Amino acid sequence: MRYYLGLDLGGTNIKAGIVDDQGRILAKLSRPTGAEHGPAAVIDAMVDSGQCAAREAGLKLSAVSRVGIGSPGPLDFDLGMVKAAPNMPGWHDVPLRDRIAQGLGRPAVLENDANAAAFGEFWAGAGRDPNIRHLVMLTLGTGVGSGLIVNGKLIHGGGGLGGEGGHMIVMPGGRACGCGQRGCLETYTSASYTARRAVEAVQQGKPSTLTAAVNAGRTIDARDVFEAAANGDHLATDIVEETALYLGIACVNFCRLLDPQMIVFAAGMVAAGDALFGPVRRVFAEQTWKVAQDHVRIVPAQLGNDAGLVGAAAVAWDADRDR
Ligand SMILES: [Zn+2]
């Protein structure tokens, strides 16, 4: 049995976990990142979290084969560096991989957090079936993160910027995205934008059961929109259908490019269940190729809140395998 330490660095929390080579979690913990104290303090906290997780699992650090780190990016994969991290002051060209390796005395590998989560689902979650070698994951949260796995390997591209499916342009001249482009998939399909589109429609005077809450200044989230749609609200139903339309088209496009065996949706909006997956699968069936039969399955993620740390461990497992 081999063991891996997964470290998931988020703007709010650091998660650490010991995971065995079958993808089982032996111990896990979470603590506040303390990003306001700067990179050196955050790295110390990550090292300490790793030591605590190993202790809780009853392992010496020397029994850990490799450490995997999931981090916000952009990253320099060759140098193991975080080039910048939104929401974390002072993170410019931080050699995170080597600092963690030095601090824990174990080899380490650095991966983008969305890629790591996708690789975790591939290894130990929805894509666990060894026959699955080609998988796409979209994380439908505040933004839309994505990870593309082709023949069992994550796509990084030439400059480490590959696999950003959330920023494919799906509407020329469409909604402004935080990345500087217009009409990105993210601006039509993230949980935040799904809620925002509903709020904007209400503010434009379209009738809805959400109107009273919007006028009272209450925060509307994607769950409220799906709930209103389930209760027969026309505006909310239109918004859900529009989200499903863009997601379904994105799935068709992923199929034309990569022919994945599985497309996994993760994070907040997955809680909507069939209310999301039903319309997406319907759009997919309507819009996809008719010249050949797709064999892709569009399914929810399975790892939930553990995706980040299992994913980081999965990346360590993969690097260990390549050695
Ligand atoms: Zn964008």
Image (tube, rainbow, N blue to C red):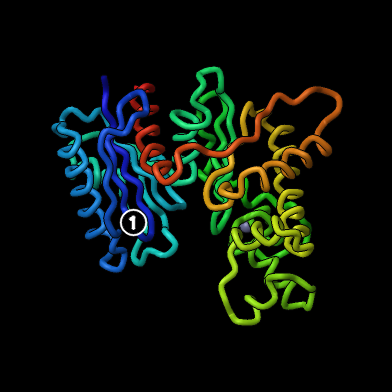
Q: Is residue 176 above or below residue 95?
A: below
29 shown above or below 65:
below
211 to the left or right of 74? right
Q: Nearer the viewer, residue 109 or 157?
A: 109
Picture residue at 21% right of the left edge, 47% below the top: 47
The reply to whether residue 193 is in sight is yes
Tell me the amino acid under the disc marked 1.
Asn
Q: Residue at x 41, y 38 (%)?
A: 311
Task: Decide if residue 79 is in sight here.
Answer: no
Residue pointed to by mark 1: 13
Q: Which of the 4 image quarters holds residue 6?
A: top left
Tell me the quadrant of ligand 1: bottom right
Quadrant containing the C terminus in the rendered view? top left
The residue lying toward the viewer, choosing from 133 and 94, is 133
Q: In the displayed structure, does residue 307 sit left or right of residue 222?
A: left
- Residue 30 percent location from the top left of the image: 29, 51
Q: Quadrant of residue 233?
A: bottom right
Quadrant that contains the N terminus: top left
Which SS class for mark 1? strand
Image position of 206 with respect to 253: above or below: below
User: Quick one: which residue is furthest to the right in this view?
Assistant: 290
The relative height of residue 162 versus residue 233 in the rendered view (above or below) is above
Mark 1 vs ligand 1: CB under 8 Å? Answer: no
Residue found 61% across the figure and 82% down from its top: 216
Classed neighbour count for the residue bearing mark 1: other residues with Cα under 10 Å, few (<14), some (14–19), many (≥20): some
Q: Residue at x 30, y 27 (%)?
A: 20
**x then y, percent, for residue 130:** 50, 18
Q: Quadrant of residue 309?
A: top left
Q: Position of residue 250 (x, y in %)?
A: 71, 43
Of all residues, the one furthest to the bottom in this rendering is 216
Residue 300: percent from the left, percent from the top? 57, 39
